[in-house]
């Protein structure tokens, strides 16, 4: 009787192992890991959320070009002029998403254009834009903060956006999700 029980237990163990191995092979074949997503499946933050900034005579215009299957959170978007938080950010109507971690959230897909007015008598010398977003595949990025100083803002005034974008990309990786430009 003991040998029968041991034999049945061994059979169950073997079947369980075969099932588990089959599951792993199937997930590898589907180009997805059972436990971890491949980090190469995700874009770098500056590729997922491409930020451009333009300075008009009365406002700062920010535009995000958001990659497919990525989104930005509305409540994580913050703008500061000279270290002072700006509460008057003109934003489009967001989409509503029920998030497993954050609950009901307001998000933006594809593009986000925001306008932040400033006092024309005291234009900002430094602009800070902080934002956070996620991939639909399950990766959420840490908050990202970009800081543009007065020399870069002069380039914005002179419509040197191509140069600014090169500076942003170059310094972005060096500063671990915080862009600080020293000119």
Image: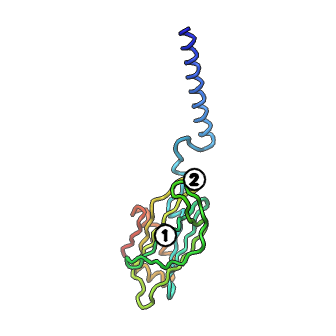
Residue placed furthest toward the top: 1
Q: Is residue 19 left or right of residue 161?
A: right
Camera-side residue of 8 and 136: 8
- Residue at x 56% of width, y 75% of height: 91
Camera-side residue of 176 and 145: 145
Q: Which mark is residue 137?
A: 2
> What secondary structure is marked by label 2?
loop
- Residue at x 60% of width, y 64% of height: 96
Residue 121, compared with residue 94, is above or below; it is: below
Camera-side residue of 126 and 8: 8
The quadrant where residue 128 appears:
bottom left
Q: How is the image coloured?
A: rainbow
Which quarter of the rendering shows the C terminus?
Answer: bottom left
- Number of numbered markers: 2
Q: Which residue is mark 1?
A: 77
> What secondary structure is marked by label 1?
loop
Residue 63 position within the rendered picture, expressed as x and y whole percent measured from the top left: 55, 74
Residue 112 position within the rendered picture, expressed as x and y whole percent measured from the top left: 57, 71
Density class for disc 2 (Cα within 10 Å; few <14, some 14-19, many ≥20) is: few
Residue placed furthest toward the front: 104
Residue 96, compared with residue 84, is above or below; it is: above
State which tag comes first along the sequence, 2 or 1.
1
Residue 15 position within the rendered picture, expressed as x and y whole percent measured from the top left: 60, 24
Residue 133, compared with residue 126, is above or below; it is: above
The quadrant where residue 150 appears:
bottom left
Residue 148, compared with residue 142, is above or below; it is: below
């Amino acid at each position: 009787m003991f040998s029968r029980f041991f034999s049945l237990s061994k059979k169950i163990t073997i079947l369980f192992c075969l099932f588990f191995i089959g599951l792993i092979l199937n997930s590898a074949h589907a180009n997805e890991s059972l436990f971890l997503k491949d980090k190469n499946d995700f874009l770098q933050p500056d590729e997922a959320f491409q930020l451009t900034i333009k300075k008009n005579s009365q406002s700062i215009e920010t535009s995000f070009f958001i990659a497919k299957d990525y989104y930005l959170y509305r409540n994580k978007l913050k703008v500061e002029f000279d270290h002072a938080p700006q509460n008057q950010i003109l934003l489009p109507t967001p989409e509503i998403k029920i998030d497993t971690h954050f609950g009901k959230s307001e998000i933006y897909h594809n593009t986000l254009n925001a306008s932040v007015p400033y006092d024309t008598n005291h234009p900002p010398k430094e602009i800070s834009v902080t934002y956070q977003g996620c991939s639909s595949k399950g990766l959420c990025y840490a908050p990202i903060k970009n800081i543009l100083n007065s020399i870069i803002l002069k380039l914005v005034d002179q419509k040197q956006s191509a140069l600014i974008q090169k500076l942003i990309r170059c310094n972005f990786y060096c500063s671990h999700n915080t862009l600080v430009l020293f000119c």
